[in-house]
Every structure is written in C-alpha cells, then in structure tokens.
Amino acid sequence: MPEENGNGENGGVEAREEGSVATSADRLVDLYREMVTVRRFEEACQRGFRQGKIGGYLHVYIGQEAVAVGFLDSFKEGDKVITAYRDHPHALLLGSDPKNVMAELYGRGSGIVKGKGGSMHLFDVERGMMGGYGIVGGHIPIGVGIAYALKYHETDNICQLYLGDGAMSQGAFHEAANLAGLWGKDGQCPCLFIVENNQYGMGTSVERTTAMTDLAAKFDAYGIEHEKVDGMDIDAVLEAAERLTEQVRETGKPYAVEALTYRTAPHGAGDFFEKYRTKEEIEEWRQRDPIGILEKKLLESEAADEEKLDEIKGEAKEQIDEAVKFADESEQPPIEELYTDVYAGEDEYMGEE
Ligand SMILES: Cc1ncc(C[n+]2csc(CCOP(=O)(O)OP(=O)(O)O)c2C)c(N)n1
Ligand SMILES: [Mg+2]
C-alpha cells in the first residue's frame, strides 16, 4: 500500500514493499477508469437482460474487476487471451468498442461477432481476444494449444488463460494442464493460467466441490509452478501480472496464479434467489470491493480528488449509455447472414488454400 503521495517528478505513488511495482498516479487513475467503465457496462447489460432486451444468457464480472484489469495491463501486442463466458471485461479491456460489444449482447448485426455469439462468445481475434466459451472447462485445452502455437511459430508472445474455480474440476482442465506442464519442460508452452477463484461455481462453493481446496496447489500435479494473489487489490494483481507475464514470456514455461476474488452479483443476470450464500457474506465482500479499495487509495494518496473520481464516473456512464443506445438502435442481422461464418467452407475445412 502506498503510504504517501508525490514521490518522483510525475507525482508517482510510492512502490509497495519488496517485489512490488511502482504505480504512477496517472496509471492508477487510468486503471480506476477501466474498472469503473467495466462496472458500468456490466450494470447496464444486466439491466438490459432483465428488461428482456438481451436474449440467451448473461454473466457479469461485478466484484472481480481488479483481476482482468490488473492482468490485462501486462498484455503485449500479439499476446492472446482466452476465457469462459464471464467475458465482457476481457473484450472491453483489449480494446473492443463498448458499442459493438453491447450490440453483440443485444444480438444485433453491428455486434463484434455480428450478433451470432452473444454474451458468452465474444471474439476479437485481431485484438487477441480468442473467446468467450460457454462450456465450462471447454476453452482450457484450446488456450493451452494457443500457447503451444505461439512458441511453435517462434513468437515471444504468451496466452493469458482465465478459468473459474469450478472449471478446475472438469476433466478438460486436467488433461490440458498435464500437456501444458509437459510441453513447458521444453519451454514450449507460454501459458499463464489465471484462476478467477470467486469461490463458487453457480451455487456450489469450492468446499462442496473438491476435497482439495488449495486450487493453486493442484497445478503441482502437472509440474506447473504457482502462487496466489489477492484479486481484490489492484496493486497486488499488477505486481503479480507484470512479474509473471514476463517470466512466462522469457521461459516459455506455464505458470498458474490463483486470484482470490468474489462476485458480488448473482451468478447469472437471471438469478435472483441466492440460497447458497448469506446477505451478510455478500456485504462483507462488498466492503472489499476492488473499486472501493482503489478509490480509497487514490484519495488517501491524493492521486485524485472526489471531483476527479466523479468526473471519471460521469464519463464512464456517458460512454456506456451511448453503447446501450447504439445497441438498441442497431438492426437485427439480415436473414441472408444466417449461415455466414457459422460453418467453415469445405476447402477451408480440408486445409486447402
Ligand atoms: C460442461 C458444463 N457443465 C455445466 C455447465 C453449467 N454451468 C455454467 S456456469 C457453471 C459454473 C462454473 O463455475 P466457475 O468455473 O467457478 O466460473 P464462474 O461462473 O464462477 O465464473 C456451470 C456448472 C456448463 N456451462 N458447462
Ligand atoms: Mg467460480
């Protein structure tokens, strides 16, 4: 935690204890803006779903923002990102326009995948966003394969592979982690596993899912080094992200980080009754809300004042209001587009030019 403000010429915030990164005031304010924008987006689409404007299903990242914001801060051009269905922040943070992301949720032709993917299947391959997958654990082998391909093609890029605590009990996780560990022995699998441990898979707590609740330690079985990070504290996440992305890039070996976090929103936007957890528990975690923590830090260190924070919140709201308007006013995809990009052409499928 920064203790005082105004270090260095740029008004940088004092670095935390050993091993931490120096986070300049401007950078922290930018990260605050990112977190608030993601939060406004998630609130808006949750509303849109409940108003019946968004079909399919939809899961928001409310409470978990510091994880994606922190790790994607270390994203380098050419890197790849893959995640499950709680994927809106990852697309937004990689630079997809909120208007097109919102339009995708609304199933419109102006959506980032032309309205065919919806909330759980966001792709923006040019920006490194490799999806958005609805089958729990289904994306993990794909992410490991992407990491292998990055080395095979002799790049120095890495794959950030996000997965939930629940996904770690899937067979696909264990098979993929096994291969990642094996390929990693030869420096051939630059995959950073980022476990978003929000402590529940739908309504089932980690304790009720597995006898071995130390999720990071499960990677030991596959020879993959690991650690844990406080996923509610952006400073802690930034430090881990910067250090670990560089390590994976340099060594070509996979690494796993378990970010302890909490979704203060229900599992999905259509869930209202949460019998599996108490209001008190949710309230306790709200006290550790990552945006609240950063806000406090910014104010205490005088990196920003109330006025600045209000201005950022206002701008984020405006941007997301515009995204909702754009989505709502966009056309449905034309019927002739129904099969376009759905099946690979025969030639493509056979691997011919
Ligand atoms: C193979 C499969 N089984 C079950 C489901 C239903 N399902 C959707 S989300 C989910 C929980 C996954 O939890 P976790 O991996 O912790 O991710 P979180 O929702 O907490 O982000 C389940 C069981 C599914 N989508 N796919
Ligand atoms: Mg979970």
Image (cartoon, rainbow, N blue to C red):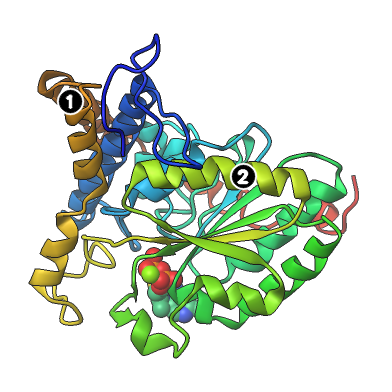
Report which residue position mark 1 lands on.
309
* Residue located 80% across and 39% down the image: 155
Kindly tell me whether mark 2's CB lies below 8 Å from ligand 1: no
> Few, some or many C-alpha atoms within 10 Å of disc 1 (few <14, some 14-19, many ≥20)?
some
Residue 245 is marked as 2
* Residue located 21% across and 60% down the image: 264
Distance between the alpha carbons at the discs numbered 1 and 2: 30 Å
Where residue 74 sits, quadrant-wise, is top right
Residue 91 is situated, as x and y percent measured from the top left of the image, at: 47, 42
Kindly tell me whether mark 1's CB lies below 8 Å from ligand 1: no
* Secondary structure type for disc 2: helix
Question: Does 139 sit left or right of 38 as displayed?
Answer: right
* Secondary structure type for disc 1: helix
Whether 191 is drawn above or below 164: the answer is above
- Image quadrant, ligand 2: bottom left
Between 326 and 273, the one lying in front of the other is: 273
The C terminus lies in quadrant = top right
Residue 57 is situated, as x and y percent measured from the top left of the image, at: 33, 63
Whether 141 is drawn above or below 214: the answer is above
Nearer the observer, disc 1 or disc 2? 2
Between 118 and 83, the one lying in front of the other is: 83
> Reading the chain from its start, which is encountered first: label 1 or label 2?
2
> Few, some or many C-alpha atoms within 10 Å of disc 2 (few <14, some 14-19, many ≥20)?
many
* Residue located 28% across and 68% down the image: 267
Work out which residue is located at the far front of the displayed protein and give it.
18
Whether 208 is drawn above or below 215: the answer is below
Q: Is residue 36 at least partly visible in the picture?
A: yes
